[in-house]
């Protein structure tokens, strides 16, 4: 019984060793004087995506109005519209921060105008 089992296992183990040898990789003419790393990967490799963070600012103004309260309300509407447009352009979630800033109101010729400086940070793909 032991002889028949050995007769069965020896060819089986040789077959496995032959299979392992078939998957070997030849590495010739590689300078090994320095540290060397060899990687074997199967299939298409995903390229590394690189991003850069950019900052920007714009001037935002609401419609002028006779009263300061209305002018601030118009500025708030302009701010909400600006944020909505920026978010619509943000298809790939690249928008990091978004701020309308604080309104500065001034009265000229019986009309009050509120304006501010907006700020935003966007993640931009480089490749």
Image (cartoon, rainbow, N blue to C red):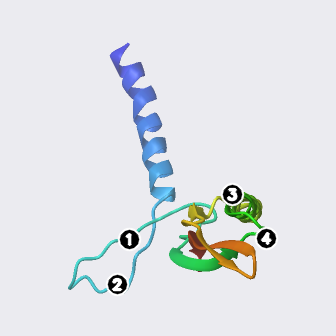
Residue at position x 40%, y 21% from top? 5
Asked if marks 1 and 2 touch (Cβ < 8 Å), the reply is yes
Q: How far apart are marks 3 and 2 (CA)?
A: 76 Å
Q: Quadrant of residue 57?
A: bottom right
Indicate which label's residue lies in the foreground, 4 or 1: 4
Going from the N terminus, do you reach mark 4 or mark 1 first? 1
Indicate the position of residue 126 as horizontal and vertical percent values.
58, 80
Going from the N terminus, do you reach mark 4 or mark 3 first? 4
Q: How far apart are marks 4 and 3 (CA)?
A: 12 Å
Read off the residue under disc 3. Answer: 69
Q: What element carries label 3?
A: helix
Read off the residue under disc 1. Answer: 38
Classify 10 Å Cα crowding around label 2: few (below 14), some (14-19), many (20 and above): few
Residue at position x 45%, y 67% from top? 25
Read off the residue under disc 4. Answer: 63
Asked if marks 4 and 3 touch (Cβ < 8 Å), the reply is no
Indicate which label's residue lies in the foreground, 4 or 3: 3
Q: Quadrant of residue 113?
A: bottom right
Read off the residue under disc 2. Answer: 30
Q: Distance between the residues labelled 2 and 4?
A: 71 Å
Indicate the position of residue 120 as horizontal and vertical percent values.
57, 70
Q: Is mark 2 on a helix, strand or loop?
A: loop
Q: What element carries label 4?
A: loop
Look at the image and tell me whether residue 102 can be seen. Answer: yes
Residue at position x 74%, y 69% from top? 62
């Amino acid at each position: 019984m032991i002889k028949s089992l050995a007769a069965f296992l020896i060819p089986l183990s040789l077959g496995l060793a032959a299979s392992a040898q078939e998957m070997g990789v030849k590495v010739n003419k590689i300078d090994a004087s320095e540290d060397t790393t060899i990687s074997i990967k199967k299939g298409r490799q995903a390229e590394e995506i690189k991003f850069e963070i950019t900052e920007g600012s714009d001037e935002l103004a609401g419609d002028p109005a006779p009263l300061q309260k209305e002018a601030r309300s118009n500025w708030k509407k302009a701010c909400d519209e600006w944020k909505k447009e920026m978010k619509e352009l943000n298809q790939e979630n690249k928008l990091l921060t978004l701020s309308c800033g604080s309104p500065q109101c001034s009265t000229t010729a019986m009309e009050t105008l509120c304006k501010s400086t907006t700020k935003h940070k966007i993640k931009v793909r480089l490749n």
